[in-house]
Image (cartoon, helix red, strand yellow):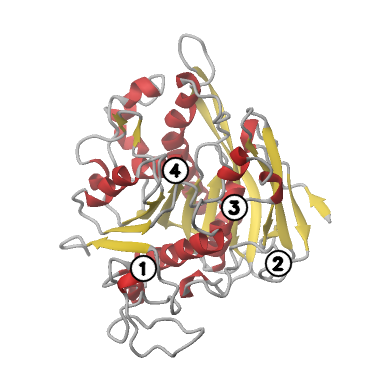
Amino acid sequence: MRRIGLGFGLAAMAAVTAVATAQRPEAGQGDTLARPPVDAPELARLGRYPVGVQRSHSVQPGQADPLRGKDRPAIGPRELPLLIWYPAASPGRGAIYHTALSGEDGRDVAFDVPGLASPDRPVAAGRFPLVILAHGYGNTPEVLSWLGENLASKGYVVVAPAFRDPPISIRTDAVRAGPIARRPLDIAFVTAEAQARAGRHEGVFAAADPARTALIGYSMGGYGVLTVGGAPLNPAMGALSRDILTPYATVRAGELRVKNLKAIVALAPAARFGEVPIWTGKGVGAVPVPTLIVVGDHDRVVGHETVRALFMAPASAPRYLLTFAQAGHSIALTPAPPAMRQRFWDMDWFEDAVWRKDRLLPIQTHFITAFLDRYVKGETAMDAYLNGLTVQSDAGRWPGAPVGRVAQYSPGPPASTVWKGFQPGRAVGMSFEYRPAPGWR
């Protein structure tokens, strides 16, 4: 195995030292879940492009750092490493990502994540939609590689910033102010920077189409993408952010808004911090683009009912809500690697108490693919995977389905009310809800 110099040294739990090349394993043998198992729903499968991966970084001068400075936040340049997955012109060797998350004692626990992307491959011809992928509090981009790689294979350029959060085990208001203050600011800057680089046809960004931009965020990242998508900040957020967000809740609110935004995906998004609601006025209902929200109904971190209220808010754009019955908060990270299975704290970052990860992640990939293809690429055929589904997955019936174990996808209505694209017996334990927007174009 050969280590290659794609890594930037990162502080605290976002430490990433390298990406190493390795022979790609066969599916089911330690493979990335970017390549789904055989019982995954239809749209989870890989697209037609090989996947490339590169690292870059962005630097924004004159930024307030809530973790530095005594009387007021220190001001200085803010550097954000970027992990970029993209459609490649030719296949290469797979990747192993080396990263770390914070342990219970605040120290990093290092581990490897297998991948299928190949470092520095030539970029495929064409212009592809731009996706910004924002991780949660204390995570790193590598633990969302299952989604970044899969979307790149389907013709998306996926840019994932490393936000370098402080250890989540340090539970003080001062420390928590870091992610609260910086997440929307960082997402807004990285998106604008990626769009600008795409406009200049700069490096791998030249493959991205800045006029077709989507945002995906998990947990704290979900809060960030909904905020920059148009949800107005509650002025009370100023006190939680060492006043860094105060002007963005009033006179500078427009500076957070992402241009050319077509869609948002929020995975288990934070919607309030303690007793403080994040948004005011119409809240997430003010977001003017289609939004897909995913949550577990036993999520005790962000609260299922709190997240469901985001879906229920009146809005001018279509809303979707995918709910996993009995699932908790850890719905979006890659399966726990061996190094993170030795202690409960470490394993709890990754694994759900009820759902297998090789079910959770491909189902999310299926719906995210349908959603982005529909609202970012404009493929109206994807409506059949999103609209007209039975709310409760278990209620679906497929009268003409062959008996026994059959690798056949449900065709959807009118022949079947089993969710389109799911195999017999695999659409269970979920609900999927749709709120159309009258007059939506």
* Helix, strand or loop under label 3: strand
Q: Quadrant of the C terminus?
A: bottom left
Q: Nearer the viewer, mark 3 or mark 2?
A: 2
Which of the marked residues, 3 or 4, is nearer the chain's N terminus? 3
Q: Looking at the image, which is closer to me, 209 or 152?
A: 152
Q: Nearer the viewer, mark 3 or mark 4?
A: 4
Count the labels in the image.
Answer: 4
Q: Residue at 55% of width from left, 32% of height from top?
A: 165
Q: Nearer the viewer, mark 1 or mark 4?
A: 4
Q: Name the residue beneath numbered marker 1.
A: 374
Image disc number at residue 29: 2
Residue 354 in picture, x, y percent from top left: 49, 55
What's under tag 3, amino acid-wise?
Ile
What's under tag 4, amino acid-wise?
Ser
* Picture quadrant where residue 299 is located: top left
What is the CA distance from the residue labelled 1 to the residue labelled 4?
A: 24 Å
Which of the marked residues, 3 or 1, is nearer the chain's N terminus? 3
Which of the marked residues, 4 or 2, is nearer the chain's N terminus? 2
What's under tag 2, amino acid-wise?
Gln
Q: Quadrant of the N terminus?
A: bottom right
Q: Residue at 45% of width from left, 20% of height from top?
A: 173
Q: In this rendering, is residue 312 above or below 10?
A: below
Q: Name the residue beneath numbered marker 3.
A: 84
Check disc 4: other Cα within 10 Å, few if <14, some if 14-19, many if 20+.
Answer: many
Q: Residue at 22% of width from left, 51% of height from top?
A: 312
